[in-house]
Image (cartoon, rainbow, N blue to C red):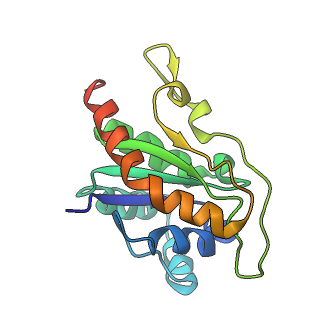
Amino acid sequence: MARKVFYSFHFDNDAWRAGQVRNIGVVDGSEPLKGNRWEDVRAKSDKEIEKWINDNLKDKSCLVVLIGSETSERKWVRYEIETAWNLGKAVCGVYIHKLKDADEQQSDEGNNPFNYFEIGGKKLSEIVPVFKSSYSSSQDVYNDIAKNIEDLVEKAISIRYKYK
């Protein structure tokens, strides 16, 4: 049975890339919001956005942060990481900058968003697993993510049990 995950990503830059990862299908991820639906969520107050995130994280086993060029700077990605961890959810990351977007472009590698959090004196980046493909072509990166994401999520869940 596929694990249920919540995908966290920078919508404006990486929605297309996030859709590719979601469509791999080996983990059960939330349907990515379409542009107009995200605009509806984004137009709400911070409290309403927090409620939407909290409601969508509730029944998930793991938060998978899809790391693009600017993901680490996004307020809501940081909120999702902190909230997921505080709820006892597993957390992991996948670098997606080498997947092509709708315009057939790759992007620059972004910073690890887990560097901004500390747990027991350790950076979260030293605790949670992050996958970065060694391939450079978008298709090879996609295939590499497809081959590894299920194990990454399982590893994150195993690690999280140690920090309960």
Q: Quadrant of the C terminus?
A: top left
Q: Is residue 91 above or below residue 12?
A: above
Q: Residue at x 60, y 32 (%)?
A: 116
x then y, percent, for residue 29:
37, 66
Q: Is residue 51 left or right of residue 104?
A: left
Q: Is residue 89 above or below residue 15?
A: above
In this figure, what is the number of numbered marks? 0
Q: In this view, which residue lies farthest toward the left? A: 1
In the image shown, does 43 or 52 lie closer to the viewer?
Answer: 52
Q: Residue at x 32, y 63 (%)?
A: 56
x then y, percent, for residue 47:
43, 58
The image quadrant of residue 59 is: bottom left
x then y, percent, for residue 19:
53, 74
In the image shown, does 6 or 73 lie closer to the viewer?
Answer: 6
Q: Residue at x 30, y 24 (%)?
A: 163
Q: In this view, which residue lies farthest toward the bottom? A: 36
In the image shown, does 7 or 116 lie closer to the viewer?
Answer: 7
Q: Is residue 5 above or below residue 159?
A: below
